[in-house]
Image: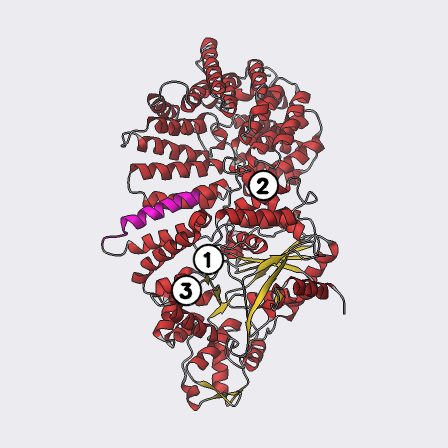
Amino acid sequence: VTGDAVNVAARLQSAAEPGGILASERTARGARGFRFGEAMRLDLKGKGQAVPAMELLEGSAAIQDRGVPGLHAPMVGRDEELSLLLTLFRRSATEGRPNLVTIYGDAGVGKSRLTSEFVMGAERERATVVRGRCLPYGDGITYWPLAEILKGHAGVLDSDPPALTLEKIRKAGRELLTKDVTSDPDRATAALAFTVNVADPEFDFVSLEPRQVRQEIHAAWRSFFSALAAETPLVVIVDDIHWADPALLDLLDESSERVVGPVLFVCPSRPDLTATRPAWGGGRRNHSSIALDPLTPEQADRLVHELLTIEDLPATVHARILERAEGNPFFLEEIVRQLIDEGHLVREGGRWRALDEIERVVIPDTVQAVLAARFDLLEASDKRVLQAAAVVGRVFWPGPVALLAHLPDDAVDASLWVLEKRELVLSRLTSSLAKQQELIFKHVLIRDVAYESLPRRDRTDAHAAVAGWIEETAGDRAGEMAELLAYHLSTAVALSRDTPGGPAEDLRSAAFGWLLRASDEARRRLVVRKAQRLAEEALDLSADALERTDALEMLAEASFVDYSGDLAWRYYREAAFTRVGTEPPDGPRVARLAALGCDVAVRWPGSMRGEIPAEETVRELWELGMSHLPPGDTDERIRLLGIRAGWPFAFTPEGYSQAELEELEAAGLEAAEMALRLGLPNRASAAYDHAIGPWLARGWYGRAIPIWERRSEIAHKVTDILEVGDFHSMGAWSHYEVGSYGRALEIADAGIDAVSGRGPGAELHVRGWRMASLYRLGRWDDALDEFASLRGLLEDRRDDPPYFATHAFGMAGVIRERRGDRVQSDGLAASILRMVTGSSGRLYPSLLRFLVVRGDLGQAKALRRPPNWAIHAGDALEAEAELLAAAEEWDGA
């Protein structure tokens, strides 16, 4: 007998201690009547990757099988779906390409059973299987499934200290990631660790722009999955993706397209996903879906017959079971288990028999009611343990359950044994906590019903206790659990609001702190919607002006990275005015908040949806910042001086004399020099950009280019990806406007090399000017390719771009119309006309030219110059001349 299995068995035998037995993880998972130790990863000769294995601790008849004797739940009615899954797996393995399949079905319809049967089939064909589960807490814990996969692969326990955790992940990265799958294996490993809130001090992801962090996280996970698939086909199970955060769905969607090698992503989901993510998997050649319907009456009848061989079961009872379950396999099984729990079905002589009174039994009409009835039959202590476990979560451990149930450890162990025999919970083969058995509710509905059966008055203390246990257990790694702690503590606060006196101050304060921390962690990973929601919850819990300021600033930061400049401006402004007059005084912070808010309105008006704030409102905030500046050279002074210089860029430059514009330029240059004295090249770059603003606002590009050239002298020191992108964008823009299209293209090409894949916002700006240069050079095929790349970066905003990218749409429209592609032209026209606002200076020239080539002269004449039209004065005047020529209004031309 030869082969890989025999080779691994021989290596495990050699690795075992004298008198000891080691089993591979797969063997241990399939064994019954045995107890194994904690999982370990062994480097075995002849294996490219570490092999997960466990030590056999005990095996005897005393270790009984869980569950009800004779009760078997075969998979019924899913043969075609199983065959399709295996076909998709084999196709992926044969073609060496990734595929993704979503299994849709209501709760209890059999998604988990189908997935389990598929996994067994794939493992028989030498697949590597990794698995993670989305949690049903609020919107879910963002990257929890990936954390489960990474920790499982690296052998990380949640009870490991931070240094050991990082070392285990580094070791796994060294063994798995090579130059074949990533250009920088160490950095990719650090990005994997950062995904699960483990920071590698050798790589500073915390200070990076969130969009760059997201790009690196996505690339790292593509490398991880590609490496796992290098030796054997890989199956990645991500359960319950209807609870997944959009950020996780984005990562899975992208990985399923760009991973290298035979990888099949299997994602069971309730149909709810199609409401929150209607485009999930749509139009992709390698995306498939399987819809699980309820069993047909014939299939349900077969399942009841195969669940138990029951003597004397009246036909009327049999019919009522089928009627109530409505083809839901889980419901069918729970009805049968209820009848056993209530004693209507009894085991005699190795067979099941129905008692006479079974005809009078009342079968509840919902699966929730069936489960509640089963819980009511439990002993009081067993039910208390079940309810306590439900508060901990779908996955739980005896430690916190004993704490919540106020029972000794041996009593909890006894109750858990009872619950396992009733098949309400299942013990897991491995545990993420040292010296703690890990269990899971057999079905999430069991957990949900158990939780709802706990009186509301008891839930507050229970959630607070779970949070305390997590903090104590995690120790220095509590930050990894920030979202989970925020969930438990904020839930405790919400529940306690219904009690006399409301939530305790220490509970409220702890919830506020963890909500802010979780929001910050989410923003750094570009999980923007969650960051905003968590910050909003923190704002709702804030007790004074200081806490309110903290929450508003967090909301502003999250909004800015989401291109929601109007929200960022509003929150920064409110934070600044909230902090004023609050003890203890903090002038520098007021100045910084004011500067950040003004910066959004003055330097980044393109991030705002709709009109920018009124000039007097922005000036009020700027003056507040100036009045709170500390003396001397400071970051806050640099920011506010720069904003003064860039003022005409955001607001109409009419009324400024050339001397006044030169004075504003001087303020920007002074800010840049101050930044360089302080060793702040990123701030200096921003100040140079502000110094250019007055000239761009008037369309005097010849005055802007020399300042840009001064900015180029420090470009090699700039690290902020937004500044890197802006430097190249402004250079390309300025040279485009003076007709140096070739030079503009060179600068844009260099910008793409510098920012591609590192920050969608920065890349979007550069690509807009690269497309414009190609358009002017007559390279229209290349221009359309660039436009496609630009729209790809916009993701769900592909027809609602930020202001600074709108000109690309008009140029694409002109090309489509000139080439006679009316369908595409009509689609772009509909999108572009929705982009028009009172400050559409960026869009105005290309929109005007687009309407002219379409022959929509009436609509073109109805356009009015926006107040900021001069930022593209040359282009605008040229487009207006084309309109007059097309209308044969020669005098105007």
Residue at which label 3 appears = 389
Residue 862 in the image, given as x and y percentages of width and height: 52, 27
Give the quadrant of residue 379. bottom left
Q: Are marks 3 and 1 in contact (CB under 8 Å)?
A: no
Q: Amino acid at mark 2?
A: Glu
**Magenta residues, start to end:** 501-519
Q: Residue at x 45, y 29 (%)?
A: 600
Residue at which label 1 appears = 136
Please state, as top left, top right, bottom left or bottom right, where the C terminus lies in the image: top right
Q: CA distance from mark 3 to mark 1?
A: 15 Å
Q: How is the image coloured?
A: secondary structure
Q: Nearer the viewer, mark 2 or mark 1?
A: 2
Say which element carries label 1. Answer: loop
Q: Amino acid at mark 3?
A: Ala
Q: Residue at x 61, y 36 (%)?
A: 790
**Mark earlier in primary sequence (2, 3):** 2
Furthest residue in direction left, as rendered: 500
**Mark earlier in primary sequence (3, 1):** 1
Residue 516 on the magenta segment: yes
Residue 674 in the image, given as x and y percentages of width and height: 46, 18
Residue 242 in the image, given as x and y percentages of width and height: 51, 56
Q: Nearer the viewer, residue 173 or 625?
A: 173
Instruction: Specify whether residue 254 is in view.
Output: no
Instruction: Specify whether residue 708 is in view.
Output: yes
**Mark earlier in primary sequence (2, 1):** 1
Q: Residues within 10 Å of mark 2 (few under 14, many from 20)?
A: many
Tell me if residue 526 comes above or below residue 300 in the rendering. Answer: above
Q: Residues within 10 Å of mark 1 (few under 14, many from 20)?
A: some
Q: Is residue 660 left or right of residue 585?
A: right
Residue at which label 2 appears = 216
